[in-house]
Image (tube, rainbow, N blue to C red):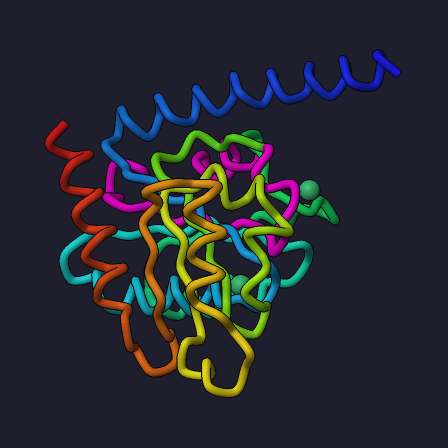
Amino acid sequence: MSRPILVVEHILSANDRLAEANRARLDAARVFAVNLMASPGAGKTSLILQTIGALKGRWRIAVVEGDLASTIDADRIAAEGVPSVQIATGGECHLDAAMIQSGLDRLPLDEVDLLIVENVGNLVCPAEFRLGVHRNVLIASVPEGDDKPYKYPPMYRGVDAVILNKIDVLSAFDFNMEYFRRGIEALNPGAAFFPLSCKTGEGVDRWLDWLEKEMRTYREG
Ligand code: MG
Ligand code: ZN
């Protein structure tokens, strides 16, 4: 069984090299890039729309939209008037560094401060493919349940921040916040945590404050 493993390692290291090239390109243009990962329906696009609405007066924002097939989310982003590129992954269940490279080719990087990457909705393999971004963020949501950190540890282990979306429906679900947080802490001590609702706007400010603080730190560095 060693052969298939070697092939996978080879593919991953090729991806890592491309990710490093993406990072160099982003840094040369001083573009701060954030990768948003989540299961389908957790609210990636909603969070992006909230973030654009709040920050577009202060920062120049662009979006790379990964989707299996449709342009529904890309169209919603484009309606906000920010540059966006759609990466139709053609059935691939994650974005990889080569796809990001092709997205960067189609964006005016010198006119962008913040690049938001919406990964394909999937809680398994996006964690395995480095893209070259500066921060990785996982969006969970209340209806998915409080046991997700325990069931999908690689996704929770590698991120800088965890967002818990849809807290407006907490009372309708048997969701134990303490259990959820303990699961994150065990895998990823000190990860930023933002419970919020894209629907009501509750808690979104704390996410925006963190994002802007990370951006400023990056730009001063
Ligand atoms: Mg979406
Ligand atoms: Zn995949």
Q: Is residue 179 left or right of residue 160?
A: right
Q: Residue at x 36, y 39 (%)?
A: 135
Point out the stretch of residues depicted in magenta. 99-128
Magenta stretch: includes residue 120:
yes
x and y percentages locating residue 46 in the rendered image: 43, 69
Quarter of the rendering containing residue 26: top left
Q: Nearer the viewer, residue 38 or 170?
A: 170
Q: Residue at x 14, y 41 (%)?
A: 216
Q: Residue at x 54, y 56 (%)?
A: 38
Q: Is residue 7 left or right of residue 217?
A: right
x and y percentages locating residue 186 in the rendered image: 46, 43
Q: Is residue 156 left or right of residue 3?
A: left
x and y percentages locating residue 140 in the rendered image: 50, 61
Magenta stretch: includes residue 75:
no
Q: Residue at x 43, y 29 (%)?
A: 132
Q: Quadrant of the N terminus?
A: top right
Tally of marks? 0
Picture quarter with ligand 2: top right
